[in-house]
Amino acid sequence: MLQAAASLGASPLRGFFKVQLPLISPGVISGALFAFAASLDEVVVVLFMGGIEQRTIPRQMWSGIREEISPAILAAATFLIVIAVLLLLVIELLQNRSEKRVGKRARS
């Protein structure tokens, strides 16, 4: 597809942003979402490998749960769930938009 864009006179940068990026964006976004979700689950790795001065979200939540369940920890967990759901909705919208574009190109 980049060759087709180049043959029509698009620069490599314009071809990437107009052709390649819309096609790969659902995969990139879903990969980032899964990496973010996996990083939140790595409390054990943070506890063993992180230094005392490093206060990551999983470590802060772990210490908050061990000491006492505070409303701040519950609010952070709710916020993270809302972010995950919103990202999933964005991915679904991007996939639907991509499918509609492919369908329009196939009919043309």
Image (tube, rainbow, N blue to C red):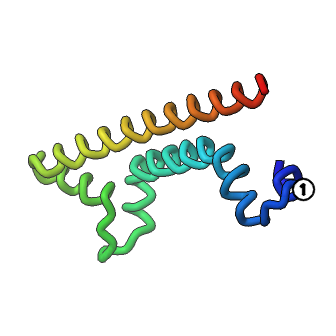
Q: Residue at x 67, y 46 (%)?
A: 24
**Residue 88 image position (x, y, % from top left):** 45, 35
The residue sitting at the top extreme is 107
**Residue 19 image position (x, y, % from top left):** 72, 50
Q: Residue at x 56, y 29 (%)?
A: 96
User: 60 left or right of 101?
Assistant: left
In the figure, 58 relative to 23: above or below?
A: below
> What residue does disc 1 label?
7
Q: In the depicted view, which residue is nearer to us: 67 or 94?
A: 94
Label 1 CA crowd tier, 10 Å (few <14, some 14–19, many 20+): few
Q: In the depicted view, which residue is nearer to us: 83 or 48?
A: 83
Q: In the depicted view, which residue is nearer to us: 6 or 22?
A: 6
User: 86 left or right of 15?
Assistant: left
Q: How many marks?
A: 1
User: 99 left or right of 61?
Assistant: right
Q: Residue at x 31, y 39 (%)?
A: 81
Q: Quadrant of the C terminus?
A: top right
Q: In the depicted view, which residue is nearer to us: 68 or 31?
A: 31
**Residue 98 image position (x, y, % from top left):** 63, 34
Q: Residue at x 66, y 33 (%)?
A: 101
Under tag 1, what secondary structure?
helix
The residue sitting at the bottom extreme is 53
